[in-house]
Amino acid sequence: MPQFLQNIDQIARAKQRDVLCLEFFSHVGDYSANPMREKILAWLDQKVIAYRECGGYASETRMESYRGQIYIDLPYDLQDPVYLALEAYLEDADSTMRWEGVRFTLYTLGYCMKNAHHDAPGFWDQWADAF
């Protein structure tokens, strides 16, 4: 059965807040067999941090396949010890990524609102018809 994934910008608009995303971009082959991804997901499970698969930032000018992106259901909050633990797990002290081929991204609500017109009923059907 096909799986329906929300794009990360759509999630931000639904949550009405900035959102966190992990992107996996250097693994060759099946994203679900990416050992870095597996290790990070196991850590999230261990810490009881909710996450779900998501699509990338939607674009009307390009299409991309799913590469294992993960929305992390945790607000970006530098006062929250859970967020700080996540950041410390993913990044070194100088803010570089600890995990090769993994990108930890904050999508601001303002940036995601640029795609608010995508939420109109029938938008993507009309887009596909004109493609």
Image (cartoon, rainbow, N blue to C red):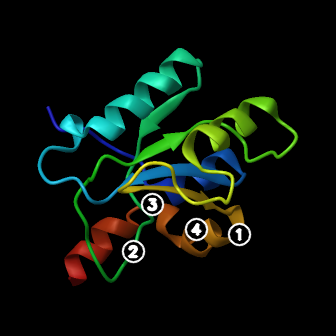
The location of residue 101, given as percent across then percent down, is 35, 56
Q: Depth check: give the residue in front, 91 or 51.
A: 91
Sequence order check, earlier mark of 1 and 2: 2
Residue type at mark 2: give it.
Ser
Q: Depth check: give the residue in front, 10 or 97.
A: 97
Secondary structure beneath label 4: helix
Provide the residue designation for mark 2. 59
Residue reaching furthest to the front? 93
Asked if disc 4 and disc 1 are in contact, CB closer than 8 Å, the reply is no
The location of residue 99, given as percent across then percent down, is 43, 48
Residue type at mark 3: give it.
Pro
Query: How far, Cα to Cα, is label 4 from label 3?
Result: 11 Å
Q: Depth check: give the residue in front, 83 or 39.
A: 39
Between circles 4 and 3, the one closer to the viewer is 4
Query: How far, Cα to Cα, is label 2 from label 4?
Result: 12 Å
Secondary structure beneath label 1: helix
Provide the residue designation for mark 4. 116
Provide the residue designation for mark 3. 121
- Please tell me how crowded label 1 is: few (under 14), some (14-19), or many (20+) other residues with Cα within 10 Å: some
Secondary structure beneath label 3: loop
Sequence order check, earlier mark of 4 and 1: 1
Query: How far, Cα to Cα, is label 1 from label 2?
Result: 16 Å
